Amino acid sequence: MARESGRTWRVRQLGFEAVIELLPWTDGDLWVVERCLSDADMMEHLGGPQSREQILDAHRRYLAAGGKGTGQMFKVVRAPLSEVIGTIGYWDKTWQDELVYETGWMIFPEYQGRGLASDAVAVLVAHVRRDHMRRFLHAFPSIANAPSNGICRKSGFTNLGECEFEYPAGHPMRCNDWCIDLRLAPSEPRGRQQ
């Protein structure tokens, strides 16, 4: 059983209630992005570990995103112990001549495989659906990243097919273009519909 309230997602797992919260990115969260972007396993599908300069640049972008009104980065926190378990966010992107939101997430390896990333995506989708103006939210996981593609499928995104993508800049990759129509209620069919 799951329910969403604000930025908190409650889900029953193994007989206890876990809570996922998305907390806005702060200056004190550098260690979180550092851990994500410097870890070879976490960056396997994203061009490999990033340099210290790239990590600091990402942290600055994460901090600025919320102030611009064009997106927001969050740290993913698991309660009741207030454990930081990763990152998630959304941002403006021009895709196929249309302004849309793009999303991405990273969950620390010791928390993967428990459905927590799916819970975080559910909270994010509810937040973006309720509070923002873009019609479509896209995710672009590598075609080789089965867990992230599974999260998109489980979260109600529609796979629009494969595409070329660049992340980080200068690193081309083959991705699936997953999309959810934010104007539809969660129980309605998803994807791009005119």
Image (spheres, rainbow, N blue to C red):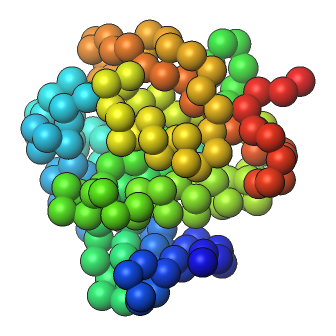
Instruction: Give coordinates of residue 104: x percent, y percent.
Output: 44, 42
The correct choice, above or below, for 191 with respect to 32 in the image is above
Q: Position of residue 141 (x, y in %)?
A: 41, 30
Q: Residue at x 40, y 40 (%)?
A: 148
Is residue 139 in view? yes
Q: Determine which quarter of the picture holds residue 144.
A: top left
Q: Nearer the viewer, residue 152 or 130?
A: 152
Residue nearer the viewer, 175 or 47: 175
Nearest the eye: 115 or 141: 115
60 w.r.t. 16: above or below: above
Identify which residue is drawn at 55% across, 23% down.
177
Q: Outermost residue, right direction?
A: 194
Residue 92 showing in the rendered view: no
Determine the residue located farthest toward the front in the rendered image: 14
Q: Residue at x 55, y 40 (%)?
A: 153
Q: Report the side of 164 relative to 52 (left or right).
A: right
User: Going by the image, does 177 lie left or right of 169?
Assistant: right
Which image quarter holds the C terminus?
top right
Residue 149 lies, in percent from the top left, at 44, 35
Horizontal side, residue 113 vs residue 72: left or right = left
Give the image location of residue 92, x and y in percent: 60, 35
Answer with the quarter of the image where residue 37 lies. Answer: top left
Q: Residue at x 34, y 64 (%)?
A: 114
